[in-house]
Image: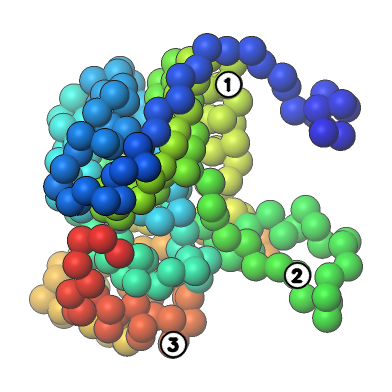
């Protein structure tokens, strides 16, 4: 409220529509989409003309999502995605399944970012915390910005569970002012100080990867680039230095059949 009162956050009036899953969704088979919000939800894929910005904490691009991404990229649509890194994700199994798509997403030309656990801490560096430990940053927002037209916000994650099992609700807001503002927010949180940018690089023959379970025959590896303490950092095949035990757990979970509804 105080930010609105000080006019630090703009107040914008806009047209919006609410879409939601019917509560009976949880009683129906996962394949029955008659109660799903998608039935009446706008076809975002057809609405996109130039670019789409996605912020989602639990991102698992299964076959359905990957097919939509491929169709968008064939049309020349730029796709920007910000999600949790292994270090900030509170659900390691979700990250493990998502990480299997790192290379496929990057090969398609998707701009992929993962939140740095030290993001925006410099803003609160003068605050006092319990035992002098600053809280770890993690991502929980679920938003989508389409061109300069639509801003979508709600409870749905981009994963099979939200699509087929959970009951979710989203708001679709049509506003140039809001989309402009949300793009600025996205760009702020994807600055090198706040997020790692993922890219593909050709693997050097003499480089040995430790604790990654990645075949040495793979010609490319994923690279995380960003900044920590104002210093440029670059991590190779280790999920942005998330910590040994988290990386081992994630790599083990990749080989466990967790099903389509984690």
Residue that mark 3 sits on:
245
Q: Which mark is residue 114?
A: none
**Colour mode of the rendering:** rainbow
Binning the other alpha carbons within 10 Å of mark 2 as few (below 14), some (14 to 19) or many (20 upward) gives: some
Callout 3 crowding tier (Cα within 10 Å): few <14, some 14–19, many ≥20: few
In the rendered image, residue 123, in percent from the top left (x then y), is placed at: 77, 53
- Residue 36 occupies quadrant: top left
Q: Name the side, left or right, on which 113 lies relative to 161.
A: right
In the rendered view, tell whether residue 231 sits above or below residue 105: below
- Residues tagged 2 and 3 counted as in contact (Cβ below 8 A): no
Question: How many labels were placed on the picture?
Answer: 3
Image point (63%, 58%), residue name: 119
Contact between marks 3 and 1 (CB within 8 A): the answer is no
Q: Residue under label 1, please give it.
A: 178
> What residue is rendered at 30% in x and 18% in y?
47
- Tag of residue 134: 2
Residue 202 can be seen, yes or no: no
> In the displayed structure, would residue 38 be above or below residue 217?
above
Residue 182 in the figure: left or right of residue 134: left
Tell me: 140 left or right of 259.
Answer: right
* Mark 1: few/some/many CA within 10 Å (<14, 14-19, 20+): many
Quadrant housing the N terminus: top right
From the viewer's perspective, tell me whether residue 250 is left or right of residue 70.
right
Which quadrant would the C terminus be assigned to in this image?
bottom left
Residue 5 location in percent, x, y?
A: 87, 26
Q: Provide the secondary structure element on which disc 2 rests.
A: loop
Q: Gap between marks 3 and 1, in whole Å?
A: 41 Å
Label 2 vs 3, first from the N-terminus: 2
User: Residue 146 placed where, x, y %?
Assistant: 40, 25
Compared with 213, 143 (above or below) is above
Label 3 or label 1, whichever comes before in sequence order: 1
């Amino acid at each position: 409220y105080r930010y609105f009162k000080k006019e630090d956050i703009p107040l914008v009036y806009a047209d919006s529509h609410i879409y939601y899953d019917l509560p009976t969704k949880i009683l129906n088979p996962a394949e029955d989409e008659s109660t799903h919000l998608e039935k009446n939800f706008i076809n975002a894929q057809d609405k996109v003309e130039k670019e789409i910005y996605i912020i989602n904490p639990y991102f698992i691009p299964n076959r359905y999502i990957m097919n939509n991404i491929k169709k968008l990229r064939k049309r020349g649509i730029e796709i920007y995605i910000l999600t949790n890194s292994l270090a900030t994700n509170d659900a390691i199994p979700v990250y493990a399944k998502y990480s299997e798509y790192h290379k496929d997403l990057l090969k398609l030309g998707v701009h992929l970012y993962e939140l740095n656990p030290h993001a925006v801490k410099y803003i609160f560096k003068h605050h006092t915390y319990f035992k002098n430990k600053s809280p770890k940053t993690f991502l929980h927002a679920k938003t989508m910005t389409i061109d300069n037209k639509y801003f979508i916000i709600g409870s749905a994650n981009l994963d099979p569970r939200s699509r087929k099992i959970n009951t979710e609700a989203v708001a679709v807001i049509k506003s140039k002012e809001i989309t402009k503002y949300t793009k600025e927010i996205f760009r702020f949180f994807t600055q090198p100080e706040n997020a790692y940018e993922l890219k593909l690089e050709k693997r050097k023959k003499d480089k040995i990867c430790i604790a990654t379970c990645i075949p040495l025959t793979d010609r490319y590896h994923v690279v995380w680039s960003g900044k920590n303490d104002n210093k440029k950092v670059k991590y190779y095949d280790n999920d942005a230095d998330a910590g040994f035990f988290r990386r081992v757990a994630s790599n083990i979970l990749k080989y466990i059949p967790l099903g389509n509804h984690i």
